[in-house]
Amino acid sequence: MIQIIKRPIITEKASKMQANRQYCFEVTPDANKIQIKQALEQMFEVNIISVRTTLIKGKVKRRMTKKGLMVGRKPLRKKAYITLKQGQTLDIVSGEAEGND
């Protein structure tokens, strides 16, 4: 179940969301919201209020080489935005959770 979560997304936008108890993770594209919620609750031992997901289509990349134009595509990605229960936080860098239950 933990293989559903690929990695946390640590960007400037994601850092600003942490003030509202919201965190962003990259997940496998075939995972649904229920599986994501169960995996994160099991991994970090926190209570999750909501899970929002978004699919990011892979971009088409082109470059010129000696053999001619090479065309490729980046893979499809899926992000999950989670909101934690009031009073709980996640320390994504160290992988620990803090909460007042």
Image (cartoon, helix red, strand yellow):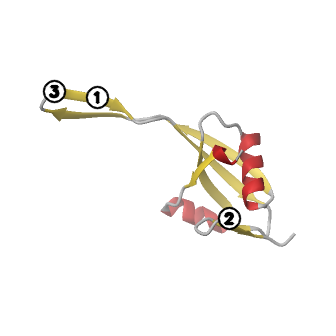
User: Tag 1: residue type?
Assistant: Val
Number of disc labels? 3
Q: Name the residue under label 2.
A: 20
Q: Which of marks 1 and 2 is nearer the N terminus?
A: 2
Residue in the image at 49% along x and 60% along y: 11
Q: Mark 3 points at which residue?
A: 68
* Label 3 secondary element: strand
- Residue 4, image x, y percentages: 65, 44
Specify the label residue 21 is tagged with.
Answer: none
Is disc 2 surrounded by few (<14), some (14 to 19) or many (20+) residues within 10 Å? few
Residue in the image at 28% along x and 28% along y: 71
Query: From what the image shows, is residue 13 above or below residue 68?
Result: below
Q: In the picture provided, is 66 more to the left or to the right than 20?
A: left
Q: Are marks 1 and 2 in contact (CB under 8 Å)?
A: no
Farthest residue toward the left?
66
- Distance (Cα) linking label 1 and label 2: 41 Å
Q: Mark 1 points at which residue?
A: 71
User: Tag 3: residue type?
Assistant: Gly
For marks 2 and 3, give the one nearer the viewer: 3
User: Tag 2: residue type?
Assistant: Asn
Residue placed most toward the observer, 4 or 86: 4
* Label 1 secondary element: strand
- Residue 60, image x, y percentages: 35, 32
